[in-house]
Image (spheres, rainbow, N blue to C red):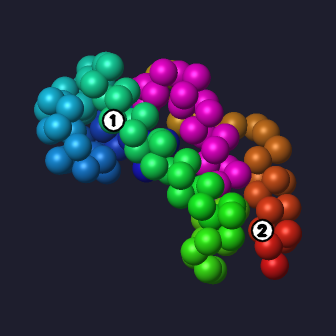
Amino acid sequence: MLRAAAHQAARRRCLLPSVSLAREGIGMEEWFAGRSGPRAARLVAEIAANAERSFSAAGRGTGGRAGMALGGLGVLGRDRLRRLARAGHDVFAPGIADPVPSDAPRLAMAWILRRC
């Protein structure tokens, strides 16, 4: 969801909860234009923290089969979350949605196979 946020905003779509945007005082036009600055960064940081908690819970083996799948995705997701954090949680930062050449796919497969 966070990786696609800028792409979706450029198409005048938003996957983030409208209630959360309103709580931060971010209007849809402001979001679509990518001008929400620190307020959006706070919201994105909150969503990223929730994702990290979900990945951690899955890594501990909670959540059954769905947890296993999420744990594998967590390897990939954490890579994205680290990049996003380095960009100040700015989903509109240049290159934030670009593919990342890394070992993440290999690590994800290793994690999934370890859980089987």
Residue pictured at 48% horizontal, 42% vertical: 49
Q: Position of residue 70 (x, y in %)?
A: 61, 65
Residue 112's disc number: 2
Q: Secondary structure at mark 2?
A: helix
- Rendered position, 22 above or below 113: above
- Rendered position, 4 above or below 94: below
Q: Amino acid at mark 1?
A: Leu
Label 2: how many Cα within 10 Å (few below 14, some 14–19, many 20+)? some
- Locate residue 75 relative to residue 42 in the image: left or right: right
- Locate residue 22 relative to residue 17 in the image: left or right: left
Residue 43's disc number: 1
Q: Sequence order check: which comes first, mark 2 or mark 1?
A: 1
Q: Position of residue 56 (x, y in %)?
A: 62, 55
Residue range in magenta is 73-92
Viewer-closest of 59 and 31:
59
Q: Secondary structure at mark 1?
A: helix
Q: Position of residue 60 (x, y in %)?
A: 69, 64
Magenta part, dominant SS: helix
Instruction: Tell me which corner region of the image, top left, top right, bottom left or bottom right, holds residue 85.
Output: top right
- Rendered position, 69 above or below 34: below
Residue pictured at 15% horizontal, 38% vertical: 22
Answer whether residue 70 is visible to the viewer in this image.
yes
Q: Amino acid at mark 2?
A: Ile
Using the numbered discs, state the Cα–Cα distance from disc 2 to disc 1 in whole angstroms.
Answer: 30 Å
